[in-house]
Amino acid sequence: MKRLTLWASALVVAMTTTIAASIQDVPLKDIDGKDTSLKAYQGKVVLVVNVASKCGLTPQYTALEALYRKYKDQGLVIVGFPCNDFGAQEPGTPTEIKTFCSTKYDVTFPLMAKLHVKGPEQHPLYLQLTGKDAKFPGDIEWNFGKFLVARDGTVIQRFSPKTTPDSAEVTSAVEAALKAK
């Protein structure tokens, strides 16, 4: 029975991925459980980040928020995707995650519902970001992996979890993406 469930989950993921023409079309839920997608940010540069509240890299929230505030008026959106796939480092409920992010790190960028970035329950968004046909294929290594998405919805760069949001590598890529119209 477990095998059948895994097969059915894989089939649903494959069907959803086939239906979505781009990552902007993949159905998502925001942190409050409302239906959305990255299409809500069409025309903006998006930094997609899988986040966690109890990780050694959690202090990256500070740099993510600073990056967001510095460039949001130029068209940057950072979208955080809470994930509990690595060492159970995001065990919280949506309310707990929102409270933690806003009180501890003053996060104002959008947060989505918790999802899986790897394994048999991998969300279709991350299947498109990391699957064999992706521009930057390969499993997510840990929390705070980052994908930079151009205004037209194409993925243009991938950054490892240890590459901080305030690094020259990330900042220069964001600036270049914002200048491209």
Image: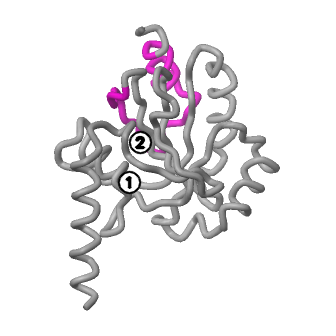
Which residue is farthest right?
Answer: 103
Pointer 2 local density, CA inside 10 Å: few below 14, some 14–19, many at least 20: some
Instruction: Check disc 1 and give the amino acid type.
Output: Glu
Q: Secondary structure at mark 1?
A: loop
Does residue 90 appear to the left or right of 97 in the view shown?
Answer: left
* Residue occupying image coordinates x 22% and y 58%: 14
Instruction: Check disc 2 and give the amino acid type.
Output: Ser
Is 155 colored magenta in this rendering?
yes
* Residue occupying image coordinates x 35% and y 61%: 122
Q: Quadrant of the C terminus?
A: top left
Q: Secondary structure at mark 2?
A: loop
Does residue 22 appear to the left or right of 41 in the view shown?
Answer: left
* Residue occupying image coordinates x 56% and y 45%: 80
Q: Are marks 1 and 2 in contact (CB under 8 Å)?
A: yes
Q: Which residues are the magenta region?
A: 153-177
Tag shown at residue 160: 2
Which quadrant would residue 91 be assigned to in this image? bottom right
Vertical comparison of 181 with 57: above or below: above
The colour scheme applied to this rendered structure is one colour
Point out residue 92 in the picture as x, y percentages from the top left corner.
Answer: 66, 67
Tell me the residue that label 1 is attached to: 141
